[in-house]
Amino acid sequence: MFVRTLKEVETTENFVHWGNGTSHRLLTEKDQMGFTVCHTVVRAGTQSELHYRNHLEACYCIDGEGEVEDMNGRVFPIRKGDIYVLDENDRHFLRGGKKTDLVLVSVFNPPLTGTERHNLNDPSGSAY
């Protein structure tokens, strides 16, 4: 058993400023659990086009609000207590709230190494 804090992660390469927020990669591939757990903040007023080609992801909102939009134009508001699941490597838009950050617990399978970074300028969506 082990315990890891957000503050500890902030002193490592597993604390990532990903362009429109931050990600504390709390559990990564090196922990050998078979999945990754992140504390993710999406800044208010931002939009990111994302596409996890190699990972499935589930995001549980623990605070704030925002929205996720699929590539068919369907927009899903996300608020505290909601989960959204990218179960088909779904390309999507992720937005922070108009005035409030979106705070998520993100779970990836297979696990991340922990140091992946987004390229929000990629026209096909940031991917890893």
Image: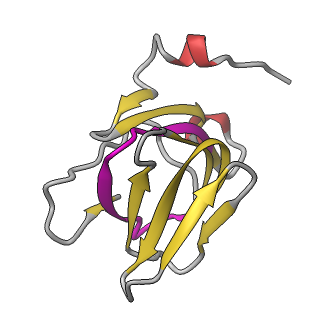
Q: Residue at x 65, y 49 (%)?
A: 61
Where is residue 47? Give x, y as percent.
31, 55
Vertical side of 15 occupied by 21: above or below: below
View extreme (right): residue? 1
Quadrant location of residue 43? top left
Q: Taken as a whole, is the magenta stretch helix, strand or loop?
A: strand
Q: Would you say 48 lies left or right of 119 here?
A: right
Can I make out residue 57 in this image? no
Q: Would you say 104 lies left or right of 12 here?
A: right
Of residues 37 and 97, the one nearer the viewer is 97
For the record, the magenta segment spans 37-58
Q: Residue at x 31, y 48 (%)?
A: 46
Can I make out residue 119 in this image? yes
Where is residue 65? Give x, y as percent.
56, 49
Where is residue 128? Give x, y as percent.
35, 58
Q: Would you say 45 lies left or right of 55 here?
A: left
Report how many numbered discs are placed on residues in the image. Answer: 0
- Please check the rendered image and state whether residue 41 is part of the magenta-colored stretch, yes or no: yes
Vertical side of 63 occupied by 50: above or below: below
